[in-house]
Amino acid sequence: MTFTSVSTPTHTIVHTATHLADVILGSIADILGTLGIDATQVFADWDRDNRAISEWIKEGSLTTVALECHQPNGVVAPIFEFPVSYTGTGEGDRKFTADRAALARYLAKLQTVPSGTIYKMFCSYNGWHSSQSGWGPATRASVAGMRSYSFGTLAAGPHASTGLRYFTK
Amino acid sequence: MERTRLIAAAPVRSASEAWQVLTTLLSDTLERGSSIPTGSVAAVLANLNGLGPALIAGGHLESKGIVLVDEGLHLTIRVLTADAALDVEENLNPVPGGASATDGWTIYFPPAGPLDKALSSAVKSSPHLSTAEPPASAPAQRSERAAKSLIDVDALRGLGN
């Protein structure tokens, strides 16, 4: 009799959450740098925001992370959305991916924004979500009437994935 | 001698945790030297808190990595993410050569694309940080330079006789 065994990698939702939270925040830092918006506060709040996004992905409550650019004249554009999709109990053979090369090509096409433009970050949920330090209720700007571009899948893990959408006037 | 170390970031650990691992590896290596005060390396790298994790999360330390250069010491540290991070065999022991570290140690950061401006500003906080192209090899240690100098002096003396 022949016995065979297969090594099955065990990756938990924690691994997926860690991966996606890093890719989302890293992409936000890169976007701000590309647009010429001061990202000092992103760096200062990095640990707090990374922990919050990771926790919300772990509990499956996070649906979208949004980055809004508020220009001095009141215009809110561009807006970036990172929608998060969940795959149930996890796909054991699915890899951890991050399409940073495609993101870099995408960012190269972005136009800078006027000096004095600031950013705001928002998270949306699919229901109950845990309370996280530094985050509270807020209202997002509308994307109605804006042109929308989809980047497709930005990063994925066995339990969830995130994409990138871009809205501009 | 040129050495390379790899550190695993997400999904193994977050970019913040990976930055802390990198800081500890550099501190443990350099602070073996009697001329490097304990805690001084972490204090220098604290100027990049938040930016360091952003460099890792953006994949900016994956291909070229940071390079630590001192007399007799040339260490490249790359931080890998995604599937590549799962295959990393880490060696987080202090790197040989650190015991003779001098106050001239410098950490060179690679180009970071959109984060270049923030990085250039951050490295101005310390003479130990740089965004310049790192030297291809470690500068010779003083003892080696002294030995070479003695040989030259002897040759000069020989010419005088």
Image (spheres, coloured by chain):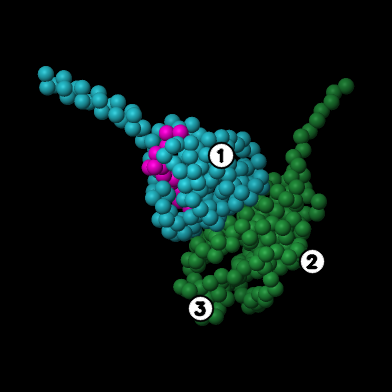
**Residue A128, disc:** 2
The chain identifier of the residue carrying mark 2 reads A
Look at the picture and state if A36 lies above or below A6: below
The chain identifier of the residue carrying mark 3 reads A
Residue type at the position of mark 1 = Leu
Residue A20 position, x and y percent, is 66, 54
Real-space Cα separation, disc 3 to disc 2, in angstroms: 35 Å
Residue type at the position of mark 3 = Pro
Task: Specify the quadrant of the image occupied by residue A160.
Answer: bottom right
Left or right of B124? Residue A160 is right
Look at the picture and state if A71 lies above or below B147: below
Real-space Cα separation, disc 2 to disc 1, in angstroms: 39 Å
Quadrant housing the C terminus of chain B: top left
- The residue located at (45%, 36%) in the rendering is B33
Q: Which residue is mark 1?
A: B6
As drawn, the residue found furthest toward the left would be B161
**Residue A72, disc:** 3
Q: Colour of chain B?
A: cyan
User: Magenta residues?
Assistant: B98-113
Q: Earlier in the sequence, mark 3 or mark 2?
A: 3
Residue B19 position, x and y percent, is 56, 48
- The residue located at (65%, 77%) in the rendering is A142
Residue A157 position, x and y percent, is 70, 50
- The residue located at (26%, 28%) in the rendering is B149
Residue type at the position of mark 2 = Trp
As drawn, the residue found furthest toward the right would be A1
Residue B97 falls inside the magenta stretch: no
Bin the neighbour count of mark 2 within 10 Å (Cα to Cα): few under 14, some 14-19, many 20 and up: few
- On the question of residue A154 being in view, the answer is no
Q: Colour of chain A?
A: green
Residue B106 falls inside the magenta stretch: yes
